[in-house]
Image: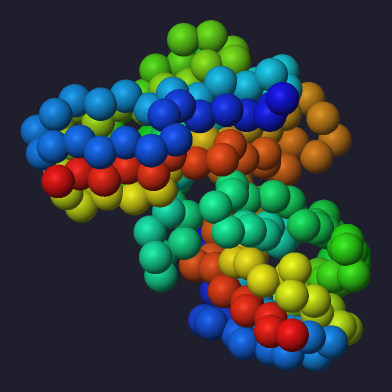
């Protein structure tokens, strides 16, 4: 079983709709992240969370919100989707308590298309 | 602020050719450096890392050395295989334990 799972894997939605992308992990890591990947732009950080009570904005948080429901779950919401939010979204985790806390482990990605 | 610049692709090579993908960084302090690989249709996987100057990370025949004097962390492999075709990302450890900073990625295509 995968350590970091994302649902759904693919999603098509319409402009103005609210959608939620979910991420779950079984690694027991305290830190979780949401990135988006666009061709030619690499990965850009949307939000990150160092524990259940800690949420931080990343480079491109406008238009997004997150919820850390539990240590193992971190969801990303698009309150009112727009076409330029069409991208590949990745969730990642890392473990502060390990000797290599910066090493991140990625989920398989969610491909989102906003029409 | 901290940043990462890696060579633009795509890089197209024949099997058994030598590979170099350049990565340079700007950072305060002494961050850790990483190479991640993304195979088609998959998420990113850690390929190798180095945590201090002159460290060499290695994995699956790939190597990269943390060069503080040139602020570089170039990825090399002596003989690439078709199965190495993927997108490669250089990344920098963030300040005060914040998230990684990624380069834009370099696409490698290896033909037989």
Count of all numbered marks drawn on residues in the image: 0
Q: Say which of A115 and A68 sits in front.
A: A115
Q: Quadrant of the N terminus of chain A?
A: top right
Q: How is the image coloured?
A: rainbow
Q: In this picture, is A1 found above or below B80?
A: above
Horizontally, residue A66 falls left or right of residue A73, namely: left
Q: Where does residue A89 sit, x and y in percent of width and height?
A: 42, 43
Q: In this picture, is A2 found above or below B48?
A: above
Q: Where does residue A81 sit, x and y in percent of width and height?
A: 17, 36
Q: Where does residue A94 sit, x and y in percent of width and height?
A: 68, 33
Q: Say which of B38 and B53 sits in front.
A: B38
Furthest toward the front, the residue is B112
Look at 45% across and 27% down and name the residue there. Answer: A7
Q: Say which of B107 and B98 sits in front.
A: B107
Horizontally, residue A89 falls left or right of residue A77, namely: right
**Residue B4 in view here:** no
Q: Quadrant of residue B106?
A: bottom right
Furthest toward the top, the residue is A70
Q: Where does residue A37 sit, x and y in percent of width and height?
A: 43, 54
**Residue B10 in view here:** yes
Look at 63% across and 22% down and name the residue there. Answer: A25
Look at 46% across and 16% down and name the residue there. Answer: A68
Look at 13% across and 37% down and name the residue there. Answer: A14
């Amino acid at each position: 079983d995968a350590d970091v799972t994302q649902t759904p894997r693919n999603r098509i939605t319409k402009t103005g709709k609210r959608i939620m992308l979910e991420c779950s992990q079984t690694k027991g890591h305290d830190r979780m992240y949401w990135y988006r990947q666009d061709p030619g732009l690499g990965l850009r950080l949307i939000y990150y969370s160092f524990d259940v009570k800690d949420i931080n904005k990343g480079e491109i948080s406008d238009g997004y919100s997150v919820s850390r429901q539990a240590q193992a779950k971190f969801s990303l919401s698009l309150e009112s989707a727009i076409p330029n939010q069409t991208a590949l979204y990745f969730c990642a985790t890392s473990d502060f308590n390990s000797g290599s806390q910066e090493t991140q482990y990625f989920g398989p990605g969610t491909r989102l298309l906003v029409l | 602020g901290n940043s990462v610049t890696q060579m633009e692709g795509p890089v197209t090579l024949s099997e058994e050719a030598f590979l170099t993908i350049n990565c340079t960084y700007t950072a305060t302090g002494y961050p850790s450096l990483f190479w991640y690989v993304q195979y088609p249709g998959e998420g990113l996987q850690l390929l190798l890392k180095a945590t201090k100057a002159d460290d060499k990370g290695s994995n699956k025949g790939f190597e990269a050395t943390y060069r503080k004097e040139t602020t570089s962390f170039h990825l090399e492999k002596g003989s690439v295989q078709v199965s190495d075709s993927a997108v490669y990302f250089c990344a920098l450890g963030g300040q005060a334990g914040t998230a990684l900073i990624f380069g834009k990625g370099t696409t490698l295509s290896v033909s037989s």
